Image (cartoon, rainbow, N blue to C red):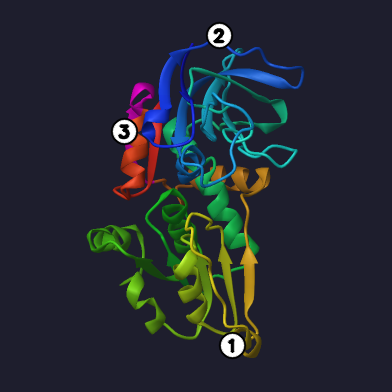
Amino acid sequence: MQAVVQTGIGGVNKLRLISLDIPSPKKDEVLIKVLYCGINHLDVLIRSGKRPGPKSLPHILGSEIVGQTQDGKKVVVYPWLQDGGTIGRTCWGGYAEYAAVPKRNLVKIPSGLKLAEVCALALAGTTAHHLIKRAKIKDKSKVLVTGATGGVGTAVLQILKSKKCQIIAATSHKNKISLLKKLGADKVILTKNMVSQKGLPYAIDLVGGVVWSKALETLGKNGTMVFCATSKQEKGQVNIGSAFSRELNILGSSGGTIDDLKAVLNLLGSRALKPVIDSMYPLKEVAAAHQKMEKQQIFGKILLQV
């Protein structure tokens, strides 16, 4: 089979298209033919050594997989493993024509759903749904969302919109303001001006670092911030006295559950959620896709059509 492997830690030159034997599934695994695989910021972080990755190289990245089983069933793969790892991080993923994945991670795709759209939500949509559920965001609430232009962010906006929330989106890219408004943001502000917002009940941070710290400042009494951001190298900071007096709730949110994935498929089926697909690349152009993500030139998801 054809596969793109990570050969070392560094730039996109560490990604190589090679021929490999089709993997032999273990007793608790299923071999699937990969049809689509999402590219995530996690992949870039692993390749560049900014997030813990595989114990050995070469390695196949790719956590968002939609494929076909040997008996013809179309399936989406729940990305997180029972032992706490992630497909594409701690075991081989979907940058390949075939993948061996745990049986328990397979979710049958309901008829009528577009496979590319399902793939765009496998990790990003599941993460978005879990963020909102973890913060217990009520319908018609006012919510600040940072970093709303990626796969997770565009899904967060749409799920919040289905809950009739009033959304304030923060971005550092002026050219993406109109896109965020079209997607449903009621107000779009530049990240540098974010602290002008005060007294908010909820904030969802998808950036980390200094932005994480600024998002906290926007919360009012008993406000809640939920975050899944680990991409920034600088540390987030909190004024403990201010957090104490405002009785803030600061919630980390790691991934999501298989029930979150199923809920997202239901939202997709009802068209309450329609993933934003920025672009699609063939397997041999993975390096170009990584470069586009690193340059922050995307709005929504990048997919590989395998």
206 vs 292, left or right, is right
- In the rendered structure, which amino acid carries the disc numbered 2? Asp
Front-most of residues 68 and 60: 60
Q: Position of residue 185 (x, y in %)?
A: 36, 66
The residue furthest front is 9
Foreground residue, 286 or 144? Answer: 286
Cα gap from disc 2 to disc 3, whole angstroms: 25 Å
Q: How many marks?
A: 3
According to the picture, the residue beneath numbered tag 2 turns out to be 21
Residue type at the position of mark 1 = Ser
User: CA separation, marks 1 and 3?
Assistant: 44 Å
Callout 1 touching callout 3 (CB < 8 Å): no
Q: Residue at x 57, y 11 (%)?
A: 22
Dominant secondary structure, magenta: strand
Q: Is residue 66 above or below residue 194?
A: above
Residue that label 3 marks:
288
Q: Quadrant of the C terminus?
A: top left
Classify mark 2: helix, strand or loop: loop
Q: Which residue is mark 1?
A: 242
Q: Measuring 66% from the left and 43% from the top, which residue is drawn there?
A: 258
In magenta, the rendered stretch is: 276-285
* Tag 3: amino acid: Ala
Dividing the picture into quadrants, the one containing residue 100 is: top right
Q: Secondary structure at mark 1?
A: helix
